Amino acid sequence: MRLSKFYLPTLKETPAEAEVVSHKLLLRAGMIRKLTAGIYSYLPAGLRTLNKISQIVREEMDNAGALEILMPTVQPADLWKETGRWDFYGKELLRMKDRHDRDYCLGPTHEEVVTDLLRREVRSYKQMPLNVYQIQTKFRDEIRPRFGLMRGREFLMKDAYSFDINEEGADKSYKAMYDAYMAIFTRLGLDFRPVEADSGSIGGSFSHEFMIIADTGEDTIAICENCTYAANLEKAEVVYAKKECVKKEVTQTEEVLTPDTHTIAELCTFLECAPEKTIKTLLFNVDGEAVAALIRGDRELNEIKLKNFLNATELEFANKAEVETWTNAPTGFAGPKNLSVSKIIADNELLLDTDYITGANKKDTHLLHIDLERDCTITAYTDLRVITEDDSCPRCGGAISLKKGIEAGHVFKLGTKYSKCMNAAYLDENGKEQTIIMGCYGIGISRLIAASIEQNHDEHGIIFPPQIAPFEIALLNLTPKDEKTSEKAEEIYTLLQGLGIEVLYDDTTERAGVKFNNADLLGLPMQILVGAKSLDNGIIEVKNRKTGEKNELKIDNLRENILNWRDTVILSWKKS
Ligand code: ATP
Ligand code: MG
């Protein structure tokens, strides 16, 4: 492609609206343009990268035996009412009416549509396993669309859905998708980790998110430095070394006046004690039931763990009136002794010690020398807190580090969540009707462009891996007025095209400096620089955009020299 015939509107200035580097560079490199909040057009270079990522995803899905289909964007409300999600999904679902006043939505995901499609088609166990996927535009009316392609409202997703006759088959389908995702993110040249994710009320550990490691990520993940364990913060288990806890005899509890101590820090200063000796009592309304959660004063409660432990649908902090009724005191003095709640769930860590300080359920008062076993009625001990870098890996005991990640993919075992309420059934070998077991698997194709740039860029611009770059090679004619140079550049352009290598040939009359800057900004992995001076010496210059390494290639035997150098550039990507 000749740059003179291409549309690459690069910008010198960074648009003010862009916060993260990928958004800035995508705008500056002329790859995308904003229509309105969270909704973007892809310009020619942007679309080329989007299509390349789609193609890699497509190839690996096909390899895994999934079949490509394409489902509609507009979905009838009736299907969403069957699963209850018309009411449940909330404002992310963009709803609309047709001319007959019937309700529709723009698809944010396709479980309903695909289940409807296949319940009409699949009758017999012989038709499964089946896995269908599509690469299609989704719409989610995100509350905070931001970071350009990272969190859009309209975005491109690959979504796949598997259909199996039994758990064993569903596990196999899940594993096949997990493996396909490993292959996809590896081929994309990304630093990523599959992490165990919370699968909410659906239960089971069958959910993994594929996280691209990047400081701008919105998720935090706990990674073991020693083994492959990685988990979402919501899910990461906290374990304790199995050292014996020698419980000390504790003297009788004692009330102590603690005026004006509203925080753990203030309490500890006032009582001259360590926060490890205090217990926080947090009160919740869980599906209409009064529940207290206890954790050490210096720890953070993981509400998702509490919610999952109680198998709850709704978990809300208790309001003022509830707190006052349950504690028989003003807010701020809750404690586990003599508390009127139906359950008290305590964090495992509290088992390691005795002699704690807690609220006294009395204004301006705390209790000293609390022994939970002796003084309170604890319903259960479980893992309730957020993991920290001081904890150790629940699998191997290695050191845990917390990192930021961008969720790029999600594999999920759905079980019969959709097939049951939508009546997607088949006849088994004995002619008996059974519910289909499903899985769903998403990849944010457009988000991946942003994620890749977050990982691969420098102060000059994007650094594209060869497999997803809009073109592989930037060919720059540095002295276009010189006839000999132009002739050579044209010759190389024809040569590369003949070899089937995608090249963007800067044949414009811009100054060399402008051409260098634009080439670095767009970040094609290889640059070939043709200028009068070097030609006189019988060479052309080449640059590896990633390493910055420059080489001189002899004009004699140029075809072979270019191909060999191209191999080294591709290798430099494989090595890292
Ligand atoms: P998030 O937690 O980031 O909102 P999600 O859990 O809602 O993601 P899924 O429903 O699992 O996402 O969707 C599958 C994939 O689609 C995600 O892994 C992500 O890569 C992509 N995706 C989701 N929401 C967006 C968005 N607003 N913009 C771009 N890509 C998105
Ligand atoms: Mg979301």
Image (tube, grey):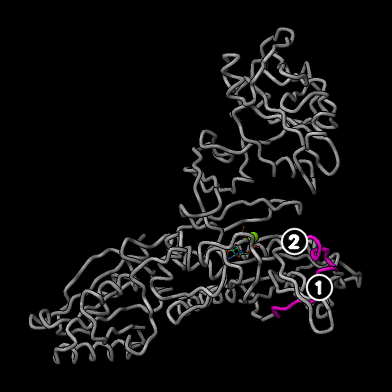
Residue range in magenta is: 72-88
**Mark-to-mark CA distance, 2 and 1:** 13 Å
The residue type indicated by label 2 comes to Gly
Q: Pick the residue in front: 399 or 134.
A: 134
Of label 2 and label 1, which has the lower sequence position?
A: 1
- Within 8 Å: ligand 2 and the Cβ of disc 2? no
Residue placed under numbered mark 2 in the picture? 90
Counting from the top left corner in percent of width and height, residue 454 is at 43, 60
How packed mark 2 is, by other alpha carbons closer than 10 Å (few <14, some 14-19, many 20 or more), is: few
- Ligand 1 shows up in which quadrant of the image? bottom right
Instruction: Name the residue at 46% across, 80% down.
Output: 43
To which quarter of the image does residue 483 belong?
Answer: bottom left
To which quarter of the image does residue 506 belong?
Answer: bottom left
The residue type indicated by label 1 comes to Ala
Instruction: Name the residue at 73% across, 40% down.
Output: 306
Residue placed under numbered mark 1 in the picture? 77
Q: Main secondary structure of the magenta part?
A: helix
Q: Seen in the image, is 25 located left or right of residue 108? A: left
Give the total number of marks visible in the rendering.
Answer: 2
